Every structure is written in C-alpha cells, then in structure tokens.
Image: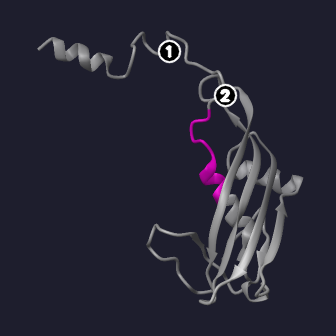
Amino acid sequence: MSGAPPEFSRPVQSTQVPLAGQQVSIEASPEEREALAQRLDLPALHALTAELELRPTDSGRVSATGRMRAEVEQTCVVTLEPFRSAVETPLDWMLLPPGEEPGEGFDGPDEVESEASGTDLGEALAQTLSLSLDPYPRRPGATLPAEAAGGARSPFAALAKLRTLR
C-alpha cells in the first residue's frame, strides 16, 4: 500500500493472537477523529470506539466479533443544520492471512484483507463507519416545508393526474 498513512491505524498480527482469544479495545484520538471527519465529510466525529474479540480459526484466519460505537455530527439534508447522532454497529469480521483475497460470497462475516505488516483494524473500523452513516441524514423532527414539496401529496400524485387525462 502506497501513499499517505491511514488516519486511524491499529495494526494487529494474526499470528500473535493467542489460541484462547484476545480482547481488543480501540479508541480514536482527537487528532484521528478530526482526520476521519475530513475524510468522511462530516462536520465532526466526537467519538469512535470498538470492542473486539479476536479468535484464531483452524484455517489460519482470525475471527473478530464485537461492536463499534460512534458519535457523529452530520448536516441535515432538510434544514442544512448540523446535528449529532449515535452510530452503533455489530462487527463480524474474518481477518484473512496476507495474500488471501476475499471471496465473492455474501454469507458470513465481512472479510478483511491483511498485508505482511498485519491487519489494520483502525482502517476496517473507518470503512465500517463510512458504510454505517446515513447518506441522507435528517435531524429528528425535520420536515420539508409544504412549498418545497410542490403541493403534491406524494411523488406519484402527478402520475395519477396524467392517468385520469387519458
């Protein structure tokens, strides 16, 4: 991997995970949260933590299960005002050995690629957070004004009107 180092890096070596498993707690620092907020186009990222349990499997992979929690500030698509919201997501990953490509199946845990230097749990969390964000965030209670809706009761009202003209 070339280029700039990731904003939030927490490498782990799969070969160093004990057979009995290992608990891992991850928390982004203020500087890491600020850099991730810029990357994810958020006004702010107030918190990002994860609790994971790592367990080696017989196939040389490592199972990683747990929960991610974040406190994000997003911009409401209706009012354009910033607001805070909580994001909580279960994590179910399979850390692949270096060089192994993810499969094409959709069943089972998300497969996380590794490099010779290890698996970057921080980058995996950043990607999970990105996918967990509402792409059209709406502040609780925010509604479109009637004039913005064009007076239509639903998106299909104009189509229904055309149908009666036939």
Residue, far left: 166
Name the image quarter holding residue 96: bottom right
Where does label 2 land, which residue?
139
Q: Residue at x 18, y 17 (%)?
A: 163
Q: Secondary structure at mark 2?
A: loop
The reply to whether the magenta stretch includes residue 136 is yes
Q: Residue at x 74, y 76 (%)?
A: 54
The reply to whether the magenta stretch includes residue 131 is yes
Q: Is residue 126 left or right of residue 110?
A: right
Q: Residue at x 83, y 57 (%)?
A: 32
Q: Is residue 163 left or right of residue 45?
A: left
Residue 36: % across, % down: 75, 53
Question: Tag 1: residue type?
Answer: Ala
Mark 2 and mark 1 in contact (Cβ < 8 Å)? no
Where does label 1 land, which residue?
148
Q: Which residues are magenta?
A: 127-137
Question: Tag 2: residue type?
Answer: Arg
Q: Is residue 38 left or right of residue 98?
A: right
Residue 11: % across, % down: 77, 75
Residue, far front: 20
Closer to the observer: label 1 or label 2? 2
